[in-house]
Image: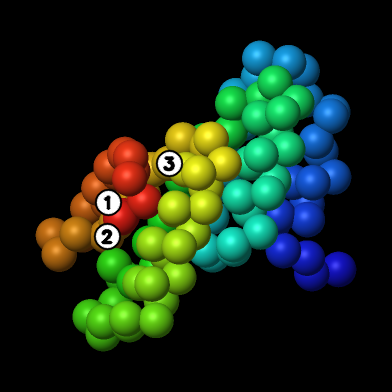
Amino acid sequence: EKRPLSTLLDDIVGKMPNGATFVIVTSNPDPQLANSVLLLKAGGVLPIVVFVDPLSFTLKPDPKAEAKQKAFFHAVLGAGGKGFVVRYQSDGSLFPEGVFDGDA
């Protein structure tokens, strides 16, 4: 069964111990993930979202996808999650960076 990551995360809310850190790695800017982050935080879990930027692996800019990514990070950070983005660099390396204001 194919389900969005956010619905899978909703299934584990309440099953993680208080004070746990939960790292979510995704390349899909699912706007519903912010709700999952809120539920995890309410359950005493520190959610960390690592977003692997699919746009950095292509040479073709996509303004609609960039806008979705910004909205995604604004929602996740607004829900109290910690955010990081991983981007592909022209030399073939991957570069992780913290996201603090949603304008990743």
Q: Residue at x 53, y 35 (%)?
A: 80
Q: Residue at x 36, y 51 (%)?
A: 102
| Relative to 54, residue 64 above or below | below
The three-letter code of the residue at mark 3 reads Gly
The three-letter code of the residue at mark 1 reads Leu
Q: State if disc 1 and disc 2 touch (CB < 8 Å).
A: yes
The picture places residue 33, in percent across and down from the top left corner, at: 63, 53
Quadrant occupied by the C terminus:
bottom left
Residue neighbourhood size for the residue with mark 1, other residues' Cα within 10 Å, grouped as few (<14), some (14–19), many (≥20) = few
Q: Disc 2 marks which residue?
A: 88
Residue neighbourhood size for the residue with mark 3, other residues' Cα within 10 Å, grouped as few (<14), some (14–19), many (≥20) = many
Q: How is the image coloured?
A: rainbow
The three-letter code of the residue at mark 2 reads Tyr
Q: Earlier in the sequence, mark 2 or mark 3?
A: 3
Residue at the top extreme of this rendering? 19
Q: Nearer the viewer, mark 3 or mark 1?
A: 3
Q: Residue at x 13, y 60 (%)?
A: 91
- Residue 51 placement, left or right of 32: left
Q: Disc 3 marks which residue?
A: 83
- Residue 21 placement, left or right of 1: left
Q: Earlier in the sequence, mark 2 or mark 1?
A: 2
| Relative to 48, residue 76 above or below | below
The picture places residue 22, in percent across and down from the top left corner, at: 62, 31
Residue neighbourhood size for the residue with mark 2, other residues' Cα within 10 Å, grouped as few (<14), some (14–19), many (≥20) = some
Q: Between marks 2 and 3, how big is the CA–CA gap?
A: 17 Å
| Count of marks placed on residues | 3
Q: Disc 1 marks which residue?
A: 94
Q: Nearer the viewer, mark 2 or mark 3?
A: 3
Quadrant occupied by the N terminus:
bottom right
The picture places residue 54, in percent across and down from the top left corner, at: 39, 68
